[in-house]
Image: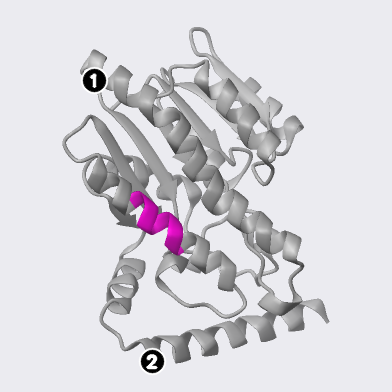
Amino acid sequence: MGYGFALITGATSGIGEAFARELARTTGLLLTGRDEARLAALAEELAEPGRQVETLAADLAGDAGRQALIARAAELPIDLLINNAGLGYFVPFVDNPAEREGEMIQVNCLAPVLLTRALLPGMLARATESGRRAGVIVVASTAAFYPLPGLATYTATKAFDLSFAESLAGELHGVPVDVLALCPGPTHSNFFDRSGLPNLKPAAMANPRQVVREGLAALGRRTVHVVGGTNRLAAAATRLAPRPLLQAGARRTMRRWGRRRRAGED
């Protein structure tokens, strides 16, 4: 399905950038992120005759950035909203500054809620009038299914994203707006470097463009899509496994990751 105009948050790298590249050339774009120079370079690369590509540098961890983006998006006929921007820090909860904990909640939870609430009425009205469908994608994570020590707040925000998207999809059943919670596993991006997580072997990480292709294909067909067959099996198993067993396995995994990070720092 083609869309007329898409808003992509966190568009300067990784999955967000891949969304900008994979959408049809007939789709107008509003790209946002914190790196103004990278936004400008991407917009210049993607712009072509007849295609409108707009950018707005905004920090979604602050109310000013969120409100500026909402105001800009309200001026455009957005019919695809991709809530992709996300923050995570691999550090024990008590060692992470409170400001960083708050930033994760602001970017990963509050920003998608406020953006979706602000833009959804217009998206719904335009879709109803035109007879076309609109879409909302919330990029969650396979981390939404697990309790991961060292990523306590991050995993909680992604569980929030998953629940928010599933619940919203239920509310919008029968109207021309599709909602998808997209749950990728480890993906090639700057996330690992920024978060402090140790990099995995390349073969263990997904290609952002494959994540995006699966997400776009799933939108309108299901409300939750976990990327990758192994990840889907693992996510399904979390619903059946006893919680203490799941927690014990997560502790072992995160301890190994902690040792790998410390070894890389030495």
Task: Decide if residue 71 is on the left or right side of residue 232.
Answer: right
Please indicate, yes or no, whether residue 183 appears anywhere in the rendered image: no
Secondary structure of the residue carrying tag 1 is: helix
What number is the disc on residue 73?
A: none
According to the picture, the residue beneath numbered tag 1 turns out to be: 128
Instruction: Please state which amino acid type lies under the numbered disc 2.
Output: Leu
Instruction: Please state which amino acid type lies under the numbered disc 1.
Output: Thr
Q: Residue at x 77, y 67 (%)?
A: 97
Q: Residue at x 70, y 35 (%)?
A: 64
Q: Residue at x 39, y 42 (%)?
A: 137
Task: Indicate the position of residue 174 as horizontal and vertical percent values.
Answer: 16, 36
Q: Nearer the viewer, mark 2 or mark 1?
A: 1
Quarter of the N terminus within the rendering:
top left
Residue 121 found in image quarter: top left
Sequence-first disc among 2 and 1: 1
Q: Residue furthest right?
A: 266
Task: Indicate the position of residue 251 as horizontal and vertical percent values.
Answer: 53, 88
Task: Indicate the position of residue 156 as horizontal and vertical percent values.
Answer: 50, 67
Label 2 neighbour load within 10 Å: few <14, some 14-19, many 20+ = few
Secondary structure of the residue carrying tag 2 is: helix
Does the CB distance between marks 2 and 1 fall below 8 Å?
A: no
Q: Nearer the viewer, residue 102 or 253?
A: 102
User: Looking at the image, is 118 positioned above or below residue 160?
Assistant: above
What number is the disc on residue 245?
A: 2
Which secondary structure dominates the residues rendered in magenta? helix
The stretch drawn in magenta includes residue 98: no
Please indicate, yes or no, whether residue 229 appears anywhere in the rendered image: yes
Q: Residue furthest left?
A: 174
User: Looking at the image, is 25 positioned above or below residue 209?
Assistant: above
Quarter of the C terminus within the rendering:
bottom right
Inter-mark Cα distance, 2 to 1: 47 Å
Residue range corresponding to the magenta coloring: 159-165
